[in-house]
Amino acid sequence: MALQSARKVRGCCSFIRALHKGPEAAPVPQVSEHAQLSWILTCMVRLPRLQHLHQWKAKSAKQQSDGTVGLLTYPVLQAADILTYKSTHVPVGEDQVQHMELVQDLAQGFNKKYGKFFPVPKSILTPMKKVKSLRDPSVKMSKSDPDKLATIRVTDSPEDIVHKFRKAVTDCTSEVTYEPSRRAGVSNLVAIHAAVTGVPVEDVVRSSTGLDTARYKLKVANAVIEKFAPIRSEIEKLKRDRDYLEKVLRVGSAKAKEIAYPVLQEVKKLVGIL
């Protein structure tokens, strides 16, 4: 996990250079404290505790295997991301509640063994609704879904977005209605349409009267394209400004390390590494 984290940090500049095919740039300072604290916390949590987490069980079942160690221990790295900065409040969605409970357990366990050091962070539930997969509306949309047609990405081209919505799973009824329990696929499209336009679901359905699902898919696709257009434009603009991106990485790394380094040093002293 430590190796993976270090590679992710090092990969930022490599990614930027690859986009521009420019000359090698000065290396960006690394923040390795997250990975080091993650290892220490991993030594304090038992295997059944991690296997109990819903996302581990769901993703393992979907992969039709026992899953990977990285998938199993990723929530501990998330805990390290939070505890390294002694966070007191963390905004999370419903699907991350169990992971936050793990963070709280780890903080309390560490404090019980080594003295009160970490604040036990509180969860702040965000009112975000889950967007369902376009190919399987019974599960949430996920960037890790192996089916590339299941997920809409902000960086998708307009052509890709239209193609994905055309392939979205609906049903044999052509009318546009919002009935999540009975018509999950169409209702998912309505929910997405309402979210990107800021229009209530009821009004979205009313404005789509007379459209069959084929034409409605195109309407939703166009609404998503319009919503994402300025975001995609800004992303493309930033990708062209390599100097600015590398400056952000350097400044951010320095600020993060300034906070994280003394925390990790104190943790190492408490556990007996230093």
Image (tube, rainbow, N blue to C red):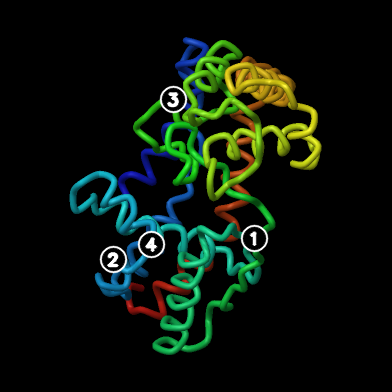
Neighbour tally class for label 2: few under 14, some 14-19, many 20 plus, Cα within 10 Å: some
Q: Does the image show residue 169?
A: yes
Q: Are marks 1 and 4 in contact (CB under 8 Å)?
A: no
Horizontal relation, residue 62 to residue 22: left or right: left
Residue at the spot of label 3: 149
Residue at the spot of label 4: 54
Neighbour tally class for label 1: few under 14, some 14-19, many 20 plus, Cα within 10 Å: few
Q: Residue at x 42, y 86 (%)?
A: 114
Q: Which marked residue is nearer to the observer: mark 1 or mark 3?
A: 3
Residue at the spot of label 1: 91
Label 1 to label 4, Cα distance in Å?
19 Å
Mark nearer the N terminus (2 vs 3): 2
Q: Quadrant of residue 74?
A: bottom left
Q: Which marked residue is nearer to the observer: mark 1 or mark 4?
A: 4
Mark nearer the N terminus (2 vs 1): 2
Q: With respect to residue 138, does 209 lie above or below?
A: above
Where residue 196 is drawn, which disc sits there?
none
Horizontal relation, residue 183 to residue 220: left or right: left
Horizontal relation, residue 32 to residue 96: left or right: left
Q: Secondary structure at mark 3?
A: loop
Q: Secondary structure at mark 2?
A: helix
Q: Are marks 1 and 3 in contact (CB under 8 Å)?
A: no
Label 4 to label 3, Cα distance in Å?
24 Å
